[in-house]
Image (cartoon, helix red, strand yellow):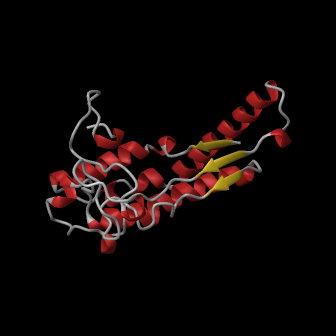
Amino acid sequence: MIVVSVGGNDLGFASIVQACFTAYLTKTTPCSQSQAGALSDANLAAAATKVKKVIDEIRAVMRRAGYTNSGYRLVLQTYPAVLPRAADARYAELSPERTVYGCPFYDADLNWGRDVAAARIGSMVKSAAAARGVETLDTLHTFDGHEFCAKSAAASTPLARPPASGAEWGRAISGEHDRAGRGAGGIPP
């Protein structure tokens, strides 16, 4: 089985997240307004073309390795929504805790990221996979109840390690930087 997560980088996903993070920290307009164009129909169509090419290239590699299409299973994975909707956020929109605990986003951006951005990217991946007869693994709701900063999930910190059944299932985004100069979670500063 070959499972591939693909498509978000073709749409500049890391840049979108960075723009949302920056908008919140600098108290400018929510990124859902400035970044909506990144997920335009034209950009999604261009990304779908690239995803189809990846599928074709994987199949070509597998053929060269002696596999027929029925000799392996190729699955494209969609992107999970890792942030809650605003109504489900543990911290109020303007609370400093949003930044401290890794969810520095406006309410509008939480809702847009969860209900629009992740869903549109997932739909694009599913469409490209279907066009090539490839299965998809829809992970959009994988983090439900365990999103970063969700009321329903306990924060994992160096001093508090809640059980997985009631915890956030990922590393939050913060202003801290690693040695490579990336923000926590691999997002560039």
In the image, is residue 5 above or below residue 83?
A: above
Residue 175, position as x, y percentages in the image = 21, 44
Res. 106 image quadrant: bottom left
Q: Residue at x 68, y 48 (%)?
A: 75
Q: Residue at x 85, y 43 (%)?
A: 70
Q: Nearer the viewer, residue 37 or 50?
A: 50
Residue 181, position as x, y percentages in the image = 26, 30
How many circles with numbers are drawn on the protein? 0
Q: Nearer the viewer, residue 93 or 10?
A: 93
> Which residue ends up furthest to the bottom in the rendered image?
87
Question: Can you say which quadrant of the picture contains the C terminus?
Answer: top left
> Which residue ends up furthest to the top in the rendered image?
64
Residue 184, position as x, y percentages in the image = 29, 41
In the image, is residue 61 above or below residue 5?
A: above
Q: Nearer the viewer, residue 115 or 49?
A: 115
Classify residue 65 as left or right of residue 174: right
Q: Residue at x 26, y 68 (%)?
A: 90
Classify residue 19 as left or right of residue 67: left
Classify residue 132 as left or right of residue 123: right
Q: Nearer the viewer, residue 163 or 34?
A: 163
Question: Can you say which quadrant of the picture contains the N terminus?
Answer: top right
Q: Residue at x 38, y 61 (%)?
A: 147
